[in-house]
Image: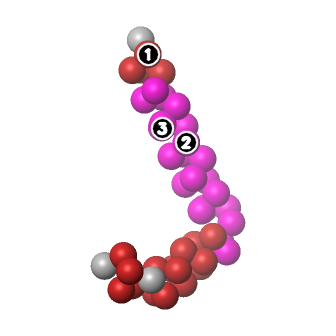
Amino acid sequence: MAMGAVGRAAMAMIEEVRRQFREIPELKKALELMNLKNENVWG
């Protein structure tokens, strides 16, 4: 029962992040810029 609740909460969080990226175009642009600047750090 608790594992199911954790799974549902995690899925709700993922859906919220997706919604924000879909509805706020500046977030996607900022993420792309961050990835370009930090290419050597993360790759």
At x 43% / y 29%, what residue is drawn? 7
Cα distance, mark 1 to mark 3? 14 Å
- Quick one: which residue is furthest to the top in this view? 1
Is the magenta region chiefly helix, strand or loop?
helix
Which disc, if any, is residue 43? none
On screen, residue 23 above or below 1? below
On screen, residue 42 above or below 33? above
Which disc, if any, is residue 2? 1
- Check disc 1 and report its element: helix, strand or loop: helix
- Residue 40 position in % (x across, y down): 36, 86
Cα distance, mark 2 to mark 3? 5 Å
Q: Residue 3 occupies which quadrant of the picture?
A: top left
- Check disc 2 and report its element: helix, strand or loop: helix
- Quick one: which residue is furthest to the left in this view? 43
The disc labelled 1 sits on which kind of residue? Answer: Ala
Asked if the residue at tag 3 contacts the one at tag 2, i.e. Cβ–Cβ closer than 8 Å, the answer is: yes
- Check disc 3 and report its element: helix, strand or loop: helix
Q: Which residue is mark 3?
A: 11
Q: Residue 20 occupies which quadrant of the picture?
A: bottom right
On screen, residue 29 above or below 9? below
The disc labelled 2 sits on which kind of residue? Answer: Met
- Residue 30 position in % (x across, y down): 60, 77
Q: Nearer the viewer, residue 6 or 17?
A: 6
Q: Quadrant of the C terminus?
A: bottom left
Please give the range of residues in magenta.
6-26
Asked if the residue at tag 3 contacts the one at tag 1, i.e. Cβ–Cβ closer than 8 Å, the answer is: no
Residue 18 part of the magenta-drawn span: yes
- Residue 4 position in % (x across, y down): 41, 20
Q: Residue 29 occupies which quadrant of the picture?
A: bottom right
Cα distance, mark 1 to mark 2? 17 Å
- Residue 14 position in % (x across, y down): 51, 46
